[in-house]
Image (spheres, rainbow, N blue to C red):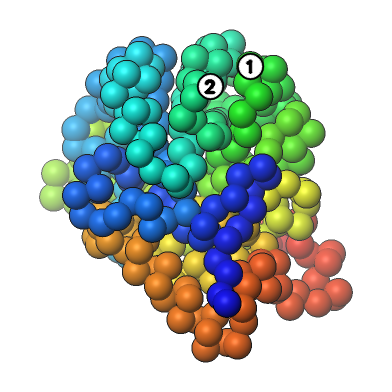
């Protein structure tokens, strides 16, 4: 019998496919059965209400998109009152994504949403840290470790640390997150990028710059997932540019235990369900019976060991 179950720490997912934070909401229950995917990952929430960044917030670029949404949020109380109860009707684990400007605020928010119905907390440490001149927590090993330690002391729930590609210290950041108590890594958030309208000569985003996501970003995120999976013992969740089942399989072979699908959902809202079916078909075609036969099966060879941990090619 074909087994798609995957294990992320103490959580068992019926299959390795779930949404990326910010691309999934309760409204999708009107489009497909939410029970068919491995887990539910909420939009990122903050302590207070936030209106988000100035418009325009999204623009297309060749093969991908840029977004500068700015994490609009109704605040933690509205989330606890309305969103968590909605997801209690499903068996799939609920992963709550949180964001904050300081380590103390992160810890407070983490404690507040550690309530029945929440199965894990995804901490978006890719967001700016006002205590470090606006640099994202996950840009440095030291700030990564400090914030994860505070979060770890604030909850007994599994912690998933969402990393950023906007750093030259990917591996050291991953190791620091693990050392501080993270139970899994989400690799990764979007890549800081920009686009300009050549007619108006103005940036295409109201906030000037935004995050690059979609197929053009996948090779970068895949490389990061591979490096992190080689460097830590906790599970890695691949995220970035996944739009086909082939992308899913690539991440699993590279070492990811599960994947998150983001931008592709805007184009095809039912794509995650289709990927689950296609993943089953792929395993059958390959004569495999268990998803674990794929995870980390990349044939990278001993000769490449010296290159694995390089942050960039020379």
Along the polypeptide, which appears first: circle 2 or circle 1? 2
Which dot marks residue 114? 2
Q: Quadrant location of residue 254?
A: bottom right
Residue at x 55%, y 66% (from the top left corner): 4
Relative placement, left or right, of 256 versus 233 is left
Q: What residue is shown with label 1? A: 154
- Residue 128 versus residue 187 in the image, above or below: above
Q: Quadrant location of residue 178?
A: top right
Q: Position of residue 118 (x, y in %)?
A: 49, 30
Q: Nearer the viewer, residue 313 or 199?
A: 313
- Residue 272 versus residue 232 in the image, above or below: below
- Residue 42 versus residue 60 in the image, above or below: above
Q: Position of residue 262 (x, y in %)?
A: 38, 52
Q: Quadrant of the N terminus?
A: bottom right
Task: State the separation of the CA atoms marked 2 and 1.
Answer: 9 Å
Q: Where is residue 32 in the image (x, y as percent from the top left)?
A: 26, 56
Residue at x 68%, y 50% (from the top left corner): 235
Q: What element carries label 1?
A: helix
Q: Position of residue 101 (x, y in %)?
A: 49, 17
Say if mark 2 contacts mark 1, CB within 8 Å: yes
User: Disc 2 or disc 1, which is closer to the eye?
Assistant: 2
Q: Which of 7 and 134 is in front in this view?
A: 7
Do we see residue 289 in this rendering?
yes
């Amino acid at each position: 019998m074909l087994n798609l179950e995957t294990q992320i720490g103490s959580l068992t997912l019926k299959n390795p496919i779930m949404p990326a934070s910010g691309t999934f909401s309760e409204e999708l229950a009107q489009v497909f059965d939410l029970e068919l995917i491995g887990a539910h990952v909420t939009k990122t929430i903050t302590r207070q209400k936030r209106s988000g960044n100035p418009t325009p917030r999204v623009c297309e670029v060749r093969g991908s998109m840029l977004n500068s949404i700015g994490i609009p949020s109704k605040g933690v109380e509205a989330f606890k009152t309305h969103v968590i109860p909605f997801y209690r009707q499903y068996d799939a684990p609920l992963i709550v994504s949180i964001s904050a400007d300081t380590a103390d605020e992160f810890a407070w928010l983490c404690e507040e949403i550690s309530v029945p119905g929440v199965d894990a907390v995804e901490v978006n440490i890719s967001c700016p840290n006002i205590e470090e001149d606006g640099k994202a927590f996950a840009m440095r090993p030291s700030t990564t470790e400090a914030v994860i330690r505070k979060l770890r002391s604030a909850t007994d729930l599994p912690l998933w640390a969402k990393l950023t590609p906007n750093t030259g210290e990917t591996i050291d950041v991953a190791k620091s997150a693990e050392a501080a108590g993270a139970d899994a890594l989400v690799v990764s958030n979007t890549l800081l990028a920009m686009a300009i309208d050549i007619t108006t000569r103005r940036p295409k985003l109201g906030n000037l710059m935004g995050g690059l996501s979609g197929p053009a970003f996948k090779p970068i995120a895949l490389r990061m997932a591979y490096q992190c999976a080689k460097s830590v013992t906790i599970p890695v969740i691949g995220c970035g540019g996944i739009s086909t089942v082939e992308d899913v399989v690539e991440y699993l072979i590279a070492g990811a235990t599960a994947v998150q699908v983001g931008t592709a959902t805007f184009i095809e809202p039912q794509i995650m369900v289709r990927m689950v079916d296609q993943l089953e078909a792929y395993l059958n075609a390959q004569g495999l019976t268990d998803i674990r036969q794929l995870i980390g099966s990349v044939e990278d060879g001993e000769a490449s060991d010296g290159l694995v941990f390089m942050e960039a090619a020379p």
